[in-house]
Amino acid sequence: MPFINRRTFTIATAGLAILPPSLALASGHQVEMLNKHPSDNTRMVFNPRLITVNVGDTVTFVPTDKSHNSESIKGMAPDGAELWKGKINQEVAVTFSQPGYYGYKCTPHVALGMVGLIVVEGDGKLDSLEAAKAVKHRGKAKKVFQEIWAEAESQGLTA
C-alpha cells in the first residue's frame, strides 16, 4: 500500500471541495435546526422547512443550534412508513423508503412554529396528501404549515 503524505492527500481531496452540492451529497440532504433563520428574523426554524427527496434518500437533521430535535408528526406520513424521534441536541438521519408527505417538528418548539415537510417523490406520492393536510396543528405551527403547503403547491409538489 503506498504511503500518503499531507501533500498527496491535499491534492487528491482538493477536487471534492468544488463538487456541486447535488453531487457532493448524492442521495443525502441536510436540514439545519436553528434558533434564527440565516436570512431573516424567523426564530425556531428548520432550514429548509420544505424539502423534496427521492425514495432511498437520507435526510440528516443537524442540531446547528442547541435545544432542538426532529420528530415525525403522527398522521403526517404514508401508511406503514417508519416514523422517527430524534433526541435533543442529537443529529438524526432518516432514510425514506416510501413516497409521500412527511411532516416533522421540533418537540420543544412546535408551538412556536418549528415544523417542516418532506416530500418523497415516486409512484403513490399523492396517496398520503389529504391525510397529511388534514392533521390539526396548534399555535404558530398551524400558520407555518399553511405557508408550507402553499409553497409546496406553488412548486407543483401537490399535484
Image: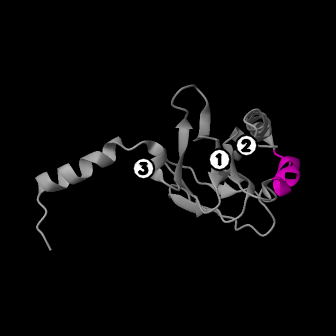
Q: Earlier in the sequence, mark 1 or mark 3?
A: 3
Write down the region rendered in magenta. 126-137
Is residue 94 visible in the rendered structure shown here? yes
Residue pictured at 74% horizontal, 67% vertical: 81
Which residue matches tag 1?
A: 52
Location of mark 2 (residue):
111
**Outermost residue toward the front?**
123
Q: How far apart are marks 3 and 2 (CA)?
A: 35 Å
Q: What SS does tag 3 mark?
A: helix
Mark 1 burial class by Cα count in 10 Å: few <14, some 14-19, many 20+ = some
Q: Is mark 2 on a helix, strand or loop?
A: helix
In the image, residue 130 lies in the stretch drawn in magenta: yes
Residue 73 location, x and y as percent? Answer: 74, 56
Which mark sits nearer the N-terminus, 3 or 2? 3
Residue 136: x, y in percent?
86, 48
Labels 2, 1: front one: 1
The answer to whether 92 is drawn above or below residue 22 in the figure is: below
N-terminal of the pair, mark 2 or mark 1, is 1
Q: Of helix, strand and loop, which one carries label 1?
A: strand
Residue 146 in magenta?
no
Q: Is residue 6 left or right of residue 110?
A: left
Instruction: Name, please, the residue furthest toward the top.
Output: 40
| Left or right, residue 12 beside residue 38 | left
Q: What residue type is labelled 3?
A: Ala
Which quarter of the image is occupied by the C terminus?
A: top right
